[in-house]
Image (tube, coloured by chain):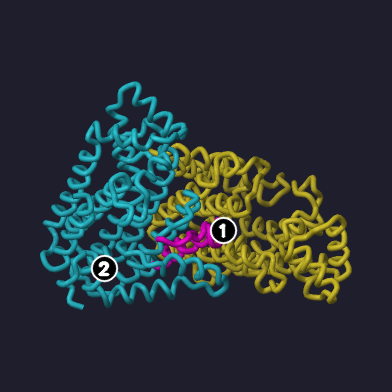
Chain colours: A yellow, B cyan
Amino acid sequence: MDSSTISKPHERLAATLDGEMTAVNELIRTRMTSEHAPRIPEVTAHLIEAGGKRLRPMLTLAAARLCGYQGEHHVRLAATVEFIHTATLLHDDVVDESGQRRGRPTANLLWDNKSSVLVGDYLFSRSFQLMVETGSLRVLDILANASATIAEGEVLQMTAAQDLRTDEAVYLQIVRGKTAALFSAAMQVGGVIAKAPESQVHALFDYGDALGIAFQIADDLLDYQGDAKETGKNVGDDFRERKLTLPVIKAVAQATTEERTFWERTIEKGRQEDGDLEHALELMNKYGTFDATRADANAWAAKAKSSLESLPDGEIRTMLSELADYVVSRLN
Amino acid sequence: MDSSTISKPHERLAATLDGEMTAVNELIRTRMTSEHAPRIPEVTAHLIEAGGKRLRPMLTLAAARLCGYQGEHHVRLAATVEFIHTATLLHDDVVDESGQRRGRPTANLLWDNKSSVLVGDYLFSRSFQLMVETGSLRVLDILANASATIAEGEVLQMTAAQDLRTDEAVYLQIVRGKTAALFSAAMQVGGVIAKAPESQVHALFDYGDALGIAFQIADDLLDYQGDAKETGKNVGDDFRERKLTLPVIKAVAQATTEERTFWERTIEKGRQEDGDLEHALELMNKYGTFDATRADANAWAAKAKSSLESLPDGEIRTMLSELADYVVSRLN
């Protein structure tokens, strides 16, 4: 397929990295099996074959290729990153008591919470085995730190989610944990395995970090402003689930005493009534927090793009730059 | 304290390794903190400070000392092993829906399932960081494989637990996953970090494997034959929870058609009535499965002891040998 005729940058990346992505998918299929416990590939296949965009493994392959890597370890690392991502999704669904993921019933609903917890643990162990096979202690260090940041961010989200004291700094930490840590590690290990100079590894990290943050802020804004047909979610799901995301945090920071009482009742205490979502939207519009949130997402996307400047020019770099535009294009 | 006056071998080991165990406990306390998410040390402290025997980290320290190790990485590895163990306990309690652990309410009861899942993930990541710090790829390989065996064993236990086709081979795999894999890895990494010859590393693995299996078989037998005051459990808890452990598996293997119907109803279908536990005990006595199970546990303990023969003689080796006797002494 000629990648220039494809409109979405991640699809162009997928077309360009087609052979390597096939190898990654094959490795994922091989390693998600278990000789003794057939429940493991059942649960994993349900999630992995639901067809996510495979964005994270693609970032690893792109970073390795960008830095001129010629070996085969980047395929292992890409599978590692997808296994870590899948493991966190399985655990998230238990934590969130979710019923749907990627438009299908979640594993915890189809099987049970036990299966989601234990199969998640298994995939995490499998990812660990894969990265050991690369023989790179630096890669292991990066992914160990990313794993800790992810888990810490999840705990932080759980405890801070309904606490009005959660400010933009805490929000950013949560976003780094739930999204950006794996994006940045995925980029970084691609460069490390290619033995790229330290300045390039640093730039790869910065790109992944900023892209992940832009991606998550955009997601949180779309929850309030998106087209339900495109996002597959109803407007205000986060409000109903009492999630303190950026548009709300910005409105709370400027709230009058009366408005603060409204946020305390609806978010902290979770006592919501008819018309509350509409009032919340009014307050966020009043303080222009949707515009401010959009500006933040755009700024992170711009930071991602500028991080690419010190990296080798070419097709891959162009696509990564377009990908940064794309994650916020739905907002503009 | 003079270790010769202490009667239990693991307490003698603890006294002998006192200084290093203090360093391990200090490292655990330091690394279980989280700058951002105070829920993490709360949950971890609840479990870690409940005072388990710290058997697994002690095995790592003992193996390293036995092989003449002079460095400090064994302390990191001992903390690693305890973190992995604690992480699996947190996830087990969610899976088993347990209410008690080490005589205290479980974390999932005191906080919630979410906290147990996510804090378990965090501790697993922390263990991963600690082992990377040792700089030994061999250690990482051993612990990655042990983690996969543990997770696979847990899934296998979940799916095989109430299936009468579960035979002794599957039981052994489950036991390796839930207990022996971490015992053997704990021993092995102690030898690896000490750069012990391959034959010794192999012997350390064999000792941990056999000790872990003897330990778990003894536990399963004590469920039916133990003194409730000593075990802290009621006789027959495993039967009521429909767990297929070795004494039952041996009775099922020899069952008449009528007896098989009884096991199908009580274990597979879980329809238990008054008098069923008594009948189950009768059947296990009829086929002598308690004696056969005790003989198996003793044989594994003997195998553990004989594995020690190729290792350097001295105080530590004697205590490890006595430890193998001790885990089955409650049965004899």
Q: Please report, as a chain letter, where disc 2 is located.
A: B
Look at the image and give the residue range highlighted in magenta: B103-130
Indicate which label's residue lies in the foreground, 2 or 1: 1
Q: Residue B170, labelled with which disc?
A: none
Q: What percent of the width, then of the height, locates residue B279?
A: 34, 33
Vertical placement of residue B138 versus A250, above or below: above
Quick one: label 1, few (<14), some, or many (20+) residues within 10 Å? few
Circle 1 marks a residue in which chain? B
Q: Going 64% across and 58% down the picture, which residue do you hit? A: A320
- Left or right: B302 with respect to A166? left
Can you tell which mark lies on residue B61? 2
Q: Which residue is mark 1?
A: B112
Rendered view: B294 above or below A322: above
Q: Position of residue A137 (x, y in %)?
A: 40, 64
Q: Is A162 in the magenta?
A: no
The reply to whether residue A211 is in sight is yes
Going 30% across and 50% down the picture, which residue do you hit? B219
Of B231 and B151, the residue lying toward us = B231
Residue B264 quadrant: top left
Quadrant of the rendered image containing residue A222: bottom right
Whole-percent x, y for residue B21 in the image? 30, 73
Q: Position of residue A117 (x, y in %)?
A: 51, 50
Crowding near the residue tagged with mark 2, few <14, some 14–19, many ≥20 C-alpha atoms within 10 Å: many
